[in-house]
Amino acid sequence: MIISKSLFPLGNAFSSVVDMQKRMDILQVQLATGKKSQSLSQLGNDRSFDMTIRNRQSRISAFQSNISIVNLRLDFLGNSMERLDELEAESRGSVASGGIGSNGSNMITTQTLATNRLDEVITLLNSEVNGRYLFAGGFSDAPPVASFDAILNGEGGRDGFNTVVGERKLADAGADGKGRLINDTLPATTSSVFGGAVDGTELLSDAEIGFANGETFTLSGGGFAPVNIALTNIGGATSGASLDIGVASIDDFVAEINAQAGANIAQVENGEIVIIADDLITPIATGGTATTGMIAANPNLDTVAISEDGAHPFGFKLSTLSSTSSAVNLTSPSGTPAALEVQFTGTPVSGETISIGLTLPDGESYTLELKAVSGAPANRGEFQIDGDVNITAANFSQALSDELLQLQTTVLEASSTYAAADNFFNASGDDIMRVDGPPFDSATALIAATPTNTVAWYQGEDSNNARQSVRGRIDETTLVNYGVQANETGMLDLVRALAALSVEDYPSGDASANERFAEMTSKQLMRLAESNNSRAGSIELITLELGIAKATNNSAKERHTNYQVQLSIMLSEIEEAPIEEVAMELLALQTRLQASYQTMSAVSQLTLVNFIK
């Protein structure tokens, strides 16, 4: 410190020492705390920059917290999706080897494994982290999927999948078990059995109709077919009486039909005439007083007609018709409901085939092929040829009926199970659908289920864009989308396939069990095939999208970390005191203070006398 030479002005000296002391106090605090100041006001002009940086750091910390939460959920989702993919692969692998195993062991094992896997899938789809359900989209506060038992067996008076499957099987099979197809060599008539109309038969006069034992009756009706007759005033009928009815075709050929009492009449005489009268005989045999019947002719017994029994979604649907034989004329399926005809114009060669394309209830296709053979059929799907085209047609018709009955218990039943799965486990935006009945075997429509009569398997959010149903903000301008819904395609297909295998059983002694099992496993392989991985909503694509979300998350985290470091450096330049500089300044100030104290002490001892000396 420079001491004034003007009579040593101690006032100024003391003021300078006080200032140095204050500065030394500040430096000591800075040295102890490492901070330039203890309040924003002490930062001066830098305080606005300090507040801006701290605000930005606070926002980055909030983003980092969001990133940590999202990463936690993505980790759990990733683990669940990985396990779902493994279950899909295991389900595919368990049916890929084929065969039923020793004593049907594979059938039993496959059903048991499917049941266990379905239970695990449902558990995974109800995964939650800190009370947030991961597969519910935005509705994350409740389990998105109903319980395993409720889904299969129902609860609270509401039907489950087992019931819906049973109803669908009845609707697809039809009352006669032919898959809702009408197969007949007769053209349509006005009877309840055949419906429609045909010409070609004339009922003969009263004189040519009578009982063998002389009983009496009154006839009304007559004319060309379709002919409805009514017999009234029947008298004298005795047990065992028979009724002779004479009929003539359009070319005057006369045929006589003898109907024994107690028997239903449904027969062909001389390749021309058919009488249908399920309720004609019994009243006669018991002395009844009134009954009705119908007589019809079929001049085209060389033609087999097949038609759907109505315009509805159930059973087989006729799609195509083809043949390798030149001995048939084909009328391909047309109309609503669809119908086709196979007319035999000659005798097919042994080995030639007639193929009918069918659409199954689950939308898949099946080709019913019947092969001509010269002798008695040794295998299913064969019909015997004959020099008489009418007989060949009848044989073909019988083989077709037999094959439809067999397909109903195998191909159709498997398809019905999967069709029911498609209806019950509804996709996004769809209603749960079930058969409108009872009765179910003649049902003609599907109707939407209600919350009071059917268990809803999925109860989470049903968004058009599942990923956007849950979002996390990880930057000022960046949102990461990571919502997942249990009813997306991949999980939905897995649930449907496992549920279908779980409810289908294969009783011992069931001759159709092996073939039905083969159909079920074939559909399982197709529905869970690797080729489906590229479809939107597949397990693999969801996993990929979640992986992209996590990569975006981690990229933002790294970016925030780097930015945070830069902001911290800027903040330290404003707030933190450079320790080395502070220490050096403190030492220099200490030296100056000591010199000042010594000088001031010496000056304070000065007097005029001492000075003169």
Image (tube, rainbow, N blue to C red):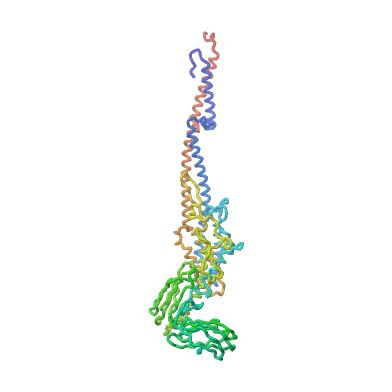
Residue at the limit of the structure toward the bottom, as seen here: 213
Q: In the rendering, at what x and y percent does residue 119 appear?
A: 56, 61
Q: How many marks?
A: 0
In this rendered view, identify the residue nearer to me: 366 or 525.
Answer: 366
Q: In the rendering, at what x and y percent does residue 556 appear?
A: 47, 46
Q: In the rendering, at what x and y percent does residue 463 appear?
A: 50, 55
Vertical position of residue 25 compared to residue 278: above or below: above
Q: Which residue is drawn at 48% across and 64% down?
A: 527
Q: Seen in the image, is 213 located left or right of residue 337?
A: right
Vertical position of residue 170 compared to residue 119: above or below: below
Q: In the rendering, at what x and y percent does residue 16 appear?
A: 51, 20
In this rendered view, identify the residue nearer to me: 564 or 247.
Answer: 247
Residue 180 in sight in this render: yes
Residue 514 in sight in this render: no
Residue at the limit of the structure toward the left, as seen here: 326
In this rendered view, identify the residue nearer to me: 435 or 48.
Answer: 435
Vertical position of residue 542 compared to residue 93: above or below: above
Residue at the limit of the structure toward the right, as seen here: 156
